[in-house]
Image (cartoon, helix red, strand yellow):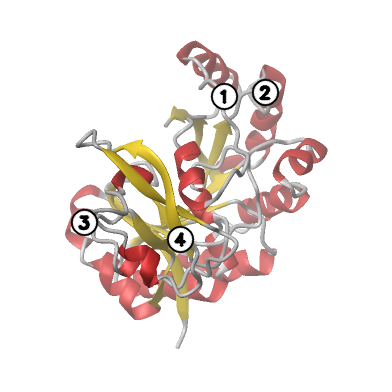
């Protein structure tokens, strides 16, 4: 039976396409953006997430230590509980031993431990998101499949999109663009809107920072435009990476070249909310920490894009 690996389902989403939407987040991504605000999306396998502030300490609980078959949890440091301000001895996780079996999460009643990544069948996921159809109908919304890169689970994503179109639901696909175009051709008839990421026009800089070249991404955008795809281009504004007028001008020229296929440009100012998520799923992994761009900076970049006659919003 066909299944997909889902790490979150977010209802009442208003930033992932028109109207009120339900956004489904699939695990797995070929890119490694240092600023990623959803690092739990990167790996394809389930991961153990630990929210340290919820841990009530080994004296009051400690169930996870005994439950782990790999002996990967042990008493750790002393810290103040976020709510009670009591000194508690929290657990520590030896990530090298963890295989994300979920035994510890199953007995963690404060929900400090959880498994990020759940298998859904096409039927189960379709039925889950279709419960929100009244919201879609009243607001002009629908369902957005996001990630990670949802097209790295191509057959599952395709089947879900097909089922949703059978139910008359508006569909959007949030994509990095970094997959073979044959996959885009298969999902195109069932996708009303592509939320298409554009991080940098320069291929060498793109590869050095993100880990992959952008030639495939740019060419896929061109081909989608030629084949009738409707796109909203999303540009994350990252300090010292793509926040200069020159880079935004190059992005504007590219978006303009796509013609009427581009219905909107979305500027997504960098934020540091992903930093704490890295801490939940890994030990010591480096992540970009920078000051978010100022409102004045974003306004200036927005004006540059608007000079190309492009409609621009800031999310």
Q: Residue at x 45, y 58 (%)?
A: 74
Residue 9: x and y in percent read 34, 58
Residue 57: x and y in percent read 30, 50
Query: Marks 1/2: CA distance?
Result: 9 Å
Q: Residue 87's quadrant in the figure? A: top left
- Residue 240 is marked as 2
Asked if the residue under mark 4 is in contact with the one under mark 3, i.e. CB atoms within 8 Å, the reply is no
Taking the view exactly as shown, the residue that stands out farthest to the bottom is 1
Looking at marks 2 and 3 on the same chain, the residue that comes earlier in the sequence is marked by: 3
Query: Marks 4/2: CA distance?
Result: 39 Å
Q: In which quarter of the image is the C terminus?
A: top left
Which residue was labeled with disc 3?
A: 137
Looking at marks 4 and 2 on the same chain, the residue that comes earlier in the sequence is marked by: 4
Q: Residue at x 45, y 48 (%)?
A: 280
Query: Marks 1/4: CA distance?
Result: 32 Å
The crowd level at tag 1 (other Cα within 10 Å; few <14, some 14-19, many 20+) is few
Which residue was labeled with disc 4?
A: 73
Looking at marks 1 and 3 on the same chain, the residue that comes earlier in the sequence is marked by: 3
Q: Which residue is drawn at 39% across and 79% down?
A: 121
Query: Marks 1/3: CA distance?
Result: 40 Å
Q: Is mark 2 on a helix, strand or loop?
A: loop
Front-lying residue, 162 or 276: 276
Q: Residue 22's quadrant in the figure? A: bottom left
Which residue was labeled with disc 1?
A: 290
Number of numbered discs overlaid on the protein picture: 4
Front-lying residue, 94 or 205: 94
Q: What element carries label 1?
A: loop
Q: Is mark 3 on a helix, strand or loop?
A: helix
The crowd level at tag 3 (other Cα within 10 Å; few <14, some 14-19, many 20+) is some
User: Compared to 280, does 227 lie above or below?
Assistant: below
* Front label number (2 vs 3): 2
């Amino acid at each position: 039976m066909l299944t997909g690996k889902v790490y979150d389902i977010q209802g009442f989403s208003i930033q992932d396409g028109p109207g009120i939407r339900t956004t489904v987040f699939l695990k797995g991504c070929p890119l490694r953006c240092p600023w990623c605000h959803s690092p739990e999306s990167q790996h394809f396998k389930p991961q153990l997430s630990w929210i340290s502030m919820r841990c009530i300490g080994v004296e009051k609980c400690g169930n996870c230590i005994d439950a782990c078959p790999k002996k990967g949890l042990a008493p750790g440091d002393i810290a103040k509980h976020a709510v009670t301000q009591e000194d508690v001895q929290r657990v520590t996780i030896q990530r090298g031993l963890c295989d994300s079996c979920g035994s510890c999460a199953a007995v963690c009643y404060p929900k400090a431990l959880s498994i990020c990544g759940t298998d859904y069948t096409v039927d189960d996921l379709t039925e889950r998101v279709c419960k929100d159809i009244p919201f879609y109908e009243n607001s002009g919304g629908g369902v957005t499949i996001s990630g990670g890169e949802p097209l790295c689970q191509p057959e599952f994503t395709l089947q879900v999109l097909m089922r949703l179109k059978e139910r008359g639901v508006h569909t959007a696909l949030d994509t990095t663009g970094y997959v073979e175009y044959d996959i885009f051709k298969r999902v195109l008839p069932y996708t009303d809107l592509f939320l298409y990421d554009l991080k940098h026009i320069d291929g060498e800089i793109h590869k050095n920072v993100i880990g992959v070249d952008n030639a495939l991404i740019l060419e896929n955008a061109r081909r989608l435009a030629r084949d009738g795809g409707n796109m909203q281009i999303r540009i994350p504004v990252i300090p010292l990476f793509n926040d200069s007028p020159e880079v935004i001008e190059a992005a504007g020229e590219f978006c303009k070249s796509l013609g009427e296929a581009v219905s909107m440009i979305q500027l997504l100012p960098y934020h540091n909310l992903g930093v704490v998520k890295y801490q939940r799923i890994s030990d010591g992994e480096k992540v970009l920490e920078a000051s978010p761009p100022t409102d004045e900076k974003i306004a200036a970049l927005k004006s540059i894009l608007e000079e190309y006659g492009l409609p621009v919003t800031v999310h």
